[in-house]
Image (spheres, rainbow, N blue to C red):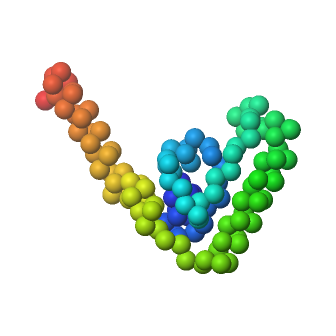
Amino acid sequence: MVVLEALASSCRVVATDLPGVMEVLGELRSEYITLVKTPRLKNMDQPHPEDLSPFVLNLAQSIELQIDRATQYPQIDLAPVRSTLAAFTWQSIFVRVEEVYFKVLQSKIKIGQVK
């Protein structure tokens, strides 16, 4: 996910509060992460016309805010996000996939599908 890559690279983040972003970030908030409320959507990717202008304005203000912060404080402290980032390393993901694999294998052994 782009948000994780940005944080892992010590970049500031401006993102919408889409479900995938919220799932990854959870309750994590920091001065270098700005979430913009997603406009109401008519379809999967089509905002209500009346929500578009406020959304664009909020997005522009959030980008300006992070540019100002980066100018004042170029370095960011990754300590608050380290545990979140650690959960999405390739090693961590592999461990979770392996756990699922072994659970499925054990259940198949118990019902006699695997010898």
Using the rendered image of the protein, determine whether residue 69 is visible from the camera's viewpoint.
yes
**In front: 112, or 3?**
3
Q: How many numbered circles does the render carry?
A: 0
Which part of the image, by quadrant, shows the C terminus?
top left
Q: Identify the residue at horizontal 75%, vertical 66% (top origin).
A: 64
In the rendered image, residue 8, in percent from the top left (x then y), is placed at: 49, 66
In the rendered image, residue 23, in percent from the top left (x then y), is placed at: 50, 44
Q: Identify the residue at horizontal 43%, vertical 67% (top origin).
A: 79
Image position of 96 (left or right of 23): left
Q: Residue furthest top?
A: 111
The quadrant holding residue 87 is bottom left
Q: Identify the residue at horizontal 34%, vertical 54% (top origin).
A: 92
Using the rendered image of the protein, determine whether residue 89 is visible from the camera's viewpoint.
no
Q: Is 100 placed above or below 71 here?
A: above
**In front: 60, or 31?**
31
Q: Residue furthest left?
A: 115
Image position of 35 (left or right of 4): right
Q: Is 42 placed above or below 4 here?
A: above
Q: Is 61 placed above or below 18 here?
A: below
Image position of 97 (left or right of 38): left
Image position of 44 (left or right of 88): right
Q: Is 74 placed above or below 87 here?
A: below
Q: Identify the residue at horizontal 76%, vertical 53% (top origin).
A: 58
In the rendered image, residue 47, in percent from the top left (x then y), is placed at: 78, 38
